[in-house]
Amino acid sequence: MMKSATSCLLLFCAALTSAKVAAAPTTHMGCLDAVAQGHRTLRLESMATAPATAPQSTHPWPFPPLSIGHTSASYQNYSGEPYFHHGLDVRGAAGTPILAAVGGRVTNIENYIPGVSAYWEIAVLDDEGYLWQYHHVEKASIPADVWNSWRNGGRVETGAKLGEIFRWGNSSYGERYDHLHLNVIAAGGTFMSPFLFLENLPDNAAPAIMAAGVLQNGRALDEGGHDEVVGPYSLYATIHDLILHDKYVVPPHRIEIAIDGGASELVWDFQTLPGKTNINIDVEDFFVPAMTCGDYTCRQLTIDLGFVPSGRHGNSPTEQGEKSTLRGFPTTPGQHNAVITAWDFAGNSVSKMIEWTVIKPS
Ligand SMILES: [Zn+2]
């Protein structure tokens, strides 16, 4: 599913990342490409030392969030190269001060897409060893003492002003998309859900299962509400969550499935990305590409419930049409059912049972 020249570059980056290149990330420039109009962090991160598990403490938000525009699980596809969003878009008005959620050493100030003023990063390595990347900081607003800390290997303390939110150039669903993009990175470059590190939000809205059924050849098998299937198949669910907003649909944080009354099986929990350091791997296996979109004007999130991370079964990325999963769905002729449950990070959940019939091949 990754065939273009840019994809090859990205895979090259992924290989370097997984090899844990210890040297300064001087090779990352070649990985930057023109598709970065959404959000894309392609720098090789080797600074974080904390394990990819829950942190010791939670921290205040950099500012009071107006809403969450995207989570780390969000599907993004601005120009044909889909990826997991890998951080949080914390919505706030342009000019809002961004305060350090946690103190630490200032490890980077950089225009990480050179010449594009939206893409300024300030990075802070906290005392537990997690690397915090604050993106879309207005350059002119970065205080002199933060610059000095970076130049001198110094620190900022919790609550220190890092800068202000950049005035974003695009609108999405009728609102100018001003926001802070926040990544939290653990050892080896693993992208963590920043929710794990931050105080709870007043989010009481459960995810919604918009549609669910049998998936065959990458498409929904719609047979009037009760699917009859012959041959290999998977199941899908279109699941939409909202966090302090009424339009900015995001994926659930955790999904489980229980088949024919059996024990629940984990599809995925986004404490980390399934590809850990790699934002591209697995995105077109977790989401159903033909039933998913994610850009400024389109959000639909359909999940393949047969998903198993490629790293877990050691497959290299498969060619399109050859996707295989380890999760087995029943092949015995007759009626079957599954209960799908999805949670947001706040713990709100939704469940839905679907039924289908396996037909014996004639
Ligand atoms: Zn973002």
Image (tube, rainbow, N blue to C red):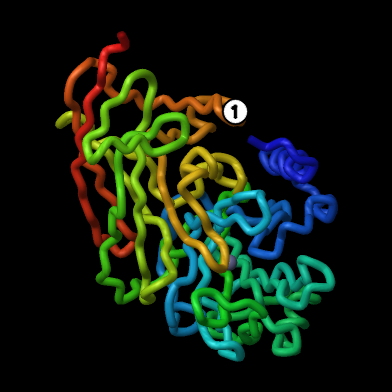
Callout 1, which amino acid?
Thr
Question: Residue 26 appears at what percent x and percent y?
Answer: 84, 54
Question: Residue 3 appears at what percent x and percent y?
Answer: 72, 36
Looking at the image, residue 258 lies above or below residue 47: above
Question: Residue 234 appears at what percent x and percent y?
Answer: 37, 31
Image quadrant where one finds the N terminus: top right
Q: Residue at x 53, y 84 (%)?
A: 159
Q: Residue at x 26, y 27 (%)?
A: 228
Looking at the image, residue 329 lies above or below residue 147: above
Work out whether residue 278 or residue 159 is closer to the camera in this orientation and state it: 278
| Residue topped by disc 1 | 318
Work out whether residue 88 or residue 200 is closer to the camera in this orientation and state it: 88
Does the numbered disc 1 mark a residue whose Cβ is under 8 Å from ligand 1? no
Q: Residue at x 55, y 52 (%)?
A: 84
Mark 1 surroundings: few (<14), some (14-19) or many (≥20) residues within 10 A: few
Relative side of 316 to 350, left or right? right
Work out whether residue 94 or residue 34 is closer to the camera in this orientation and state it: 34
Image quadrant where one finds the C terminus: top left
Relative side of 173 to 25, left or right? left
Q: Residue furthest top?
A: 362
